[in-house]
Image (tube, grey):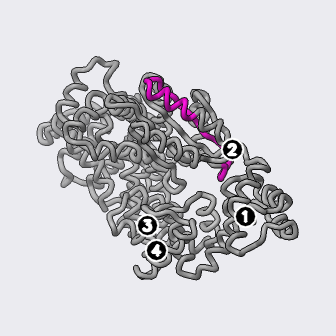
Amino acid sequence: MLLERAHELRLLRAALADARDGAGRLVIIEGPAGIGKTALLAQTCEAAVDEGLQLLSARGHELEHEFAFGVARQLFELPVARATPERQDHLLAGAASLTRPLLGLERRRDDRDADADAPAASRPAPDIGFTLSHGLYWLTANLADSGPLMIALDDAQFADRSSLQCITYLAARCHELPLLLVLTVRSDEASAADELLMALRSSADNILSPAVLSRGGVAQLVRQRLGDQADSGFCGACARATGGNPFLLGELLMELDGEAVAATAENAAQVERASPESVRRVVLGRLERMGPEPMALAQAVAVLEHANLRDAAALARLAQPAAVAAADQLLSAAILTEEPLTFVHPLLRLAVYEQIPPARRADDHRRAALSLAAAGGSALVVGSHLLRASPSGDQEVVSLLLTAAGAAHAGGDLNAAITLLRRALSEPPDRPFRGAVLGQLGQMEALAHDPACIEHLVEALAVTDAPAARVAVAMTLGEVLVWGGGRSVEAYEMLSRVLAELGPGLDPRLRATLETLRVATASVDARLARRIGQQRDDLLALAEVAEVAEAQPVQREAEHGVGAA
């Protein structure tokens, strides 16, 4: 039983009972780091499993919060993947089929046909965020058909915005389902999605804010660890040094026990000199005493945030036997947990991470990205490491960032794609890659209505050689100049120049695409309209050759061609 948490546990048990009886609940556990939020969540998860509820759990990670739907995948990928084919068909029936691409599954033809036959109000919205939120709600509902369900999200302040939007959508409707939704939120950590967390708070059935331990509670823990005869003055010093924070108190007591400090009145002054910050630093002292190999492995895990032993050992430059021995020491010292290796508490990771010199830390992120990419790791995880690495002119890094940007865009995260492409531009890319980076960046910025797209598209046009890629850039630039800036004359002249530069050998279908846009550009400006008549006959003749009616696939080819050198 957790100390001085009876009130919180009682409310969580009641919410669990309500969900089991069909009345869904949203509970938020908030407070500073180390106050015991995760422990409350873990005990509630254990109770849910004991009572026969299905459990889906995920944790927000600081390293991955830039990328869309990461937490949503943590929650739903495994239950769907483990389901039998019949069960999977049930889980992904109806609107839940919208989540198939998110979960790495192709949508079935009958799902697509059902969308086409459905009334307009029930069709998926063009906004991918809403579409997936709606789909994940129905996936949750289908999961709940077979029994009550608990969804647990730890460290929600680190969750990506897209997943939090899905959670917010689900929370607003959780009362319709036999569902307990429990989130932990660190109150002393700013989030890029504070407004979504505020929306969740406003719809929560209970907001639990565990208090610091009382002096009596601190004394009880001190005596459990250091002996029943611990002096009251010594216990009071421990309370003042840690502020009653359970995690910091546990770390302090582990250090005092390890150094065989007697819990006497005379030693209270030694504890009195400690502070919450100095208590965090005892972890580093403990690591240093273990030796260089455990320290190196701990630092590698701090950079990776969570990792298997192979990846952590590679980053730490440790041979496998040495890595195994180091991991055993860190596990025995309650610094790391296993499967995967991760710190027992975010405060420990932060203490170790911030102790790594900044230049080496940036290089560690670069090496981690290259190693994970070579092992077939997630493109978005690779990209998240590269965002924290220093530019070095490495063309492999540019290539990996392009891949990560494509994955982010495919996942519906336009902002993350732009961030990754801007990082690729700062590497910087050599000419073969520069046109690809600028072209993709300009197109993504155009979709986001960012004025910076014009500068990037103009430069991309100047350094891109592949005809299909040049056509794609010119198309985007022309549309932005006309519809976004009222610069139709400039757009017309640019399209004319590109047509001339590409010459008569250009694929007729690509030429028809550019000519069509050039005519459309002239049609919206009185200064250019008279030129349409001169081009109409040429365009009609070109259409017969190019079969413009079937040119849509070529347009897609041109868009993809931006990635070509």
The residue tagged 3 is 369
Task: Indicate which disc, 2 or 4, sits on the residue closer to the N terminus.
Answer: 2
- Nearer the camera: disc 3 or disc 2: 2
Secondary structure, mark 3, is: helix
Q: Residues within 10 Å of mark 2 (few under 14, many from 20)?
A: some
Secondary structure, mark 2, is: loop
Task: Indicate which disc, 1 or 4, sits on the residue closer to the N terminus.
Answer: 1
The residue tagged 2 is 4
Secondary structure, mark 4, is: helix
Q: CA distance from mark 3 to mark 1?
A: 47 Å
| The residue stretch that appears in magenta | 12-35
Task: Indicate which disc, 3 or 1, sits on the residue closer to the N terminus.
Answer: 1
- Which of the pair 3/291 is nearer the observer? 3
- Which of the pair 39/263 is nearer the observer? 263
- Nearer the camera: disc 3 or disc 4: 4
Is-magenta flag for residue 89? Answer: no
The residue tagged 1 is 227
Residue 100: quarter of image: top left
Residue 242: quarter of image: bottom right
Q: CA distance from mark 3 to mark 4?
A: 10 Å
The residue tagged 4 is 315
